[in-house]
Image (cartoon, rainbow, N blue to C red):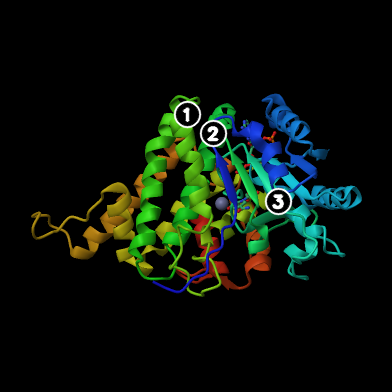
Amino acid sequence: MNNFSFNCPTKFVFGRGTTDQTGAQLAALGHRHALVVYGQGSVVRTGTLGRVLASLDEAGVSYVELSGARPNPEIELVRKGVELARNEKVDVILGVGGGSTIDTAKAISLGVPYTGDTWDLFSRAAQPIAEGKPPVACVLTIPAAGSEASDSCVITNDEKCLKKGLSTDLNRPELAIMDPELTFTLPPYQTAAGVTDMCAHIMERYFSGADAVPVTDGIACSLLRTLIAEAPRALANPEDYDARANIMWVGMLAHNGIAGVGRNLVPTSRAGGWESHGLEHELSAHDPKIAHGAGLAVIFPAWMRYVWRENPERFLAFGRDVFDIEPVNPEEDGVDITAEQAVADAVEATIDALQEFFVSMGMPSTLGELGITEADIDALIQTLEQNKGAEFGEFKRLTMEDARNIYMSAL
Ligand code: NZQ
Ligand code: ZN
């Protein structure tokens, strides 16, 4: 188990009716004037925004609003938000929505104390500044990205056709209101994309370069098993509170860092090479209509099939602990195959089981289903190289040729 530092200071207020506590919770933290950020209308239609604003009124927290954060959020709205937050001298940025809204709130918060263009922080031309940065709070409406407690913020720059993540503990929200009833209105596709993203957050860490870490691996596999059990229940009955609640809490645990501690190679870094996320971000930057989770449903199994031979034991452990898949023992079981073939069969069965789970929820299994064709791959590789350099990854270092092979295998 490797050394690590893990700092997750977010206060979680979880459960039925917690939405109505937003104002009181912010006031208790000393906040008086909020910038309320939200997406493209779901929170208006569902009444969530009205409830949040009423609770702010009741608690004496004044506010200004910024709407329009789109899925795979764009830097232009962030720039507007930075200006608004500065002019209004708000003391907290409150995101009401999913990862796209919360990431917009995080990026605005990062932009407030920085005098240049906020994109500089994402392009690494400048470093984030702690002093003068207003805290971020959120009311989560879709469990998926885990942004409610993560150290990460992902923003797209349409002009440059780049989608970039920025990880720093400064991104950790101060407060997360998590009311599973808000997720009853989620369409099945968004529910499924969210669950897929959570699986990916757990697996990126599980398949990192470190050796087995039983305590952390046990958490990871338990979270995955929970998703595999609860997602079909939530999809069959969108108002199944317990299924929704379990999924919501897994989404946070999948990405606040606890599912990877001790697996990181460098004490200050998060665990994993995040290969599938790197490959996926190019898809949703190329076409922002592609849901991040749907892209991962295609990319993750394709990456697995490409790299598993680097460490078959890790894949066998994963198959055993998540899907109860054991390789046959050719001698004991009287089967006429080599030991190598038995391992390959078990690994393939494991990857098939994972992909079947994604497909059973309505997720795609090919890039074609996402509207990506062979003709798009050159552009994907070009921006991938800009983002990642000539090589990236940890489980297996991936060159741009490897990346191309993975995209091609997923067509
Ligand atoms: O925009 P509105 O109208 O609110 O609709 C949203 C959006 O269309 C809708 N929605 C949200 N809650 C709803 C609802 N519809 C009905 N009922 C509700 N309760 O769902 C759609 C998707 O929302 P979005 O916020 O885009 O989803 P998600 O949480 O999956 O966020 C995706 C973004 O997060 C980034 C992704 O790359 C992507 O840009 N990520 C952020 C991470 C982080 N900050 O730690 C890590 C992740 O790996 C990920 O990269
Ligand atoms: Zn993700």
Residue 180, disc:
2
Badge 1 amino acid: Tyr
Residue closer to the observer: 143 or 324: 143
Residue at 64 percent of width and 48 percent of height: 175
Q: Nearer the viewer, residue 363 or 50?
A: 50
Q: Is residue 235 above or below residue 390?
A: above
The amino acid type, in three-letter code, at marker 2 is: Pro
Indicate the position of residue 272 as horizontal and vertical percent values.
49, 65
**What is the distance, in whole Å, between disc 2 and disc 1 at their CAs?**
7 Å
> How many numbered discs, if any?
3
Q: Is residue 320 left or right of residue 252?
A: left
To which residue does mark 3 refer? 136
Judge whether residue 319 can be spotted in this image.
Answer: yes
Seen at 25% across and 60% down, the residue is 343
Q: Hey, what amino acid is under mark 3?
A: Val
Q: Which residue is mark 1?
A: 241
Q: Earlier in the sequence, mark 2 or mark 1?
A: 2
First of labels 3, 2 by sequence position:
3
- Please report contact status of discs 2 and 1: CB closer than 8 Å, yes or no: yes
